[in-house]
Amino acid sequence: MHKTVIAALVSAAALSPLAAHAAGMMKQGLWDMTMKSDAMASRPALTPQQQEMMRQRGIAMPQMQDGAMVTKFCVSKEMAERDHPPAMSQNRMGCETKNFKRSSNGYSADLVCDGPNMQGTGTIKGTFSGNESFASTYDFKGTAHGHPVNTHQETSGKWVSADCGSVKPPPLSK
């Protein structure tokens, strides 16, 4: 079960910035991201290997505050200018974003996972308050490492600074 929770958390953490992305809606620079999830309520401590996997995916090591995972995320100029969400680590998890739609102050997308470790479907919805903050929800139902997963996550983001400092943006795929 430990792997299941970790897979759900890593997937959700990796996809949160992806879910929030929409050209012209996110300001370039450093963002504070706060993620609350029912899976995090019973989250075991991450092993050093799991922490390294998150770092490799461009996720600054999170801190736990009031039952939420809080992390820093860098939005590069290229990310801010894209008119579609970057694939980021979805393909490593065997997931694909489909039906991405933007509105004047929001976005929505479907997530379909059919990889060796994750199978299932999810939805991502969010709204922006200007280009310096957003709120989103992510719901996923399926399996991770053969165990059932039914998770709900709420993410919020707030722009902090134009300078990302030591936080590096994640590698982008086409």
Image (cartoon, rainbow, N blue to C red):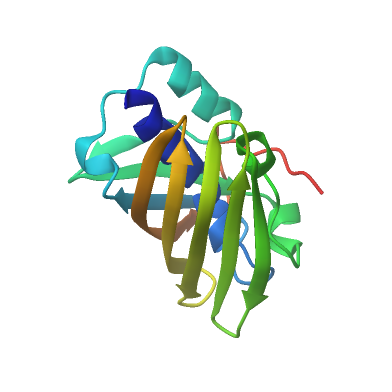
Residue at the far bottom: name it. Answer: 104
Residue 157 found in image quarter: bottom left
Q: What residue is shown at x 65% (from left), y 75% (from top)? A: 101
Is 77 above or below relative to 48? Answer: below
- Direction from residue 21 to residue 60 in the image, left or right: left
Residue at the far top: name it. Answer: 48
Q: What residue is shown at x 68% (from left), y 59% (from top)? A: 85
Q: Residue 55: horizontal and vertical position, in percent?
A: 53, 27
Q: Nearer the viewer, residue 52 or 37?
A: 37
Q: What residue is shown at x 74% (from left), y 63% (from top)? A: 81
- Direction from residue 44 to residue 117 in the image, left or right: right
Is 134 above or below relative to 171? Answer: below
Q: Residue 122: horizontal and vertical position, in percent?
A: 50, 58
- Direction from residue 11 to residue 28 in the image, left or right: right
Q: What residue is shown at x 59% (from left), y 33% (from top)? A: 57
Q: Residue 132: horizontal and vertical position, in percent?
A: 49, 67
Q: Nearer the viewer, residue 42 or 34?
A: 42
The mark total stands at 0
Is 99 above or below relative to 39? Answer: below
Q: Residue 154: horizontal and vertical position, in percent?
A: 35, 59
Q: Nearer the viewer, residue 156 or 138?
A: 138
| Residue 138 in view here | yes
Image quarter where the N terminus lies is top left
| Residue 30 in view here | no
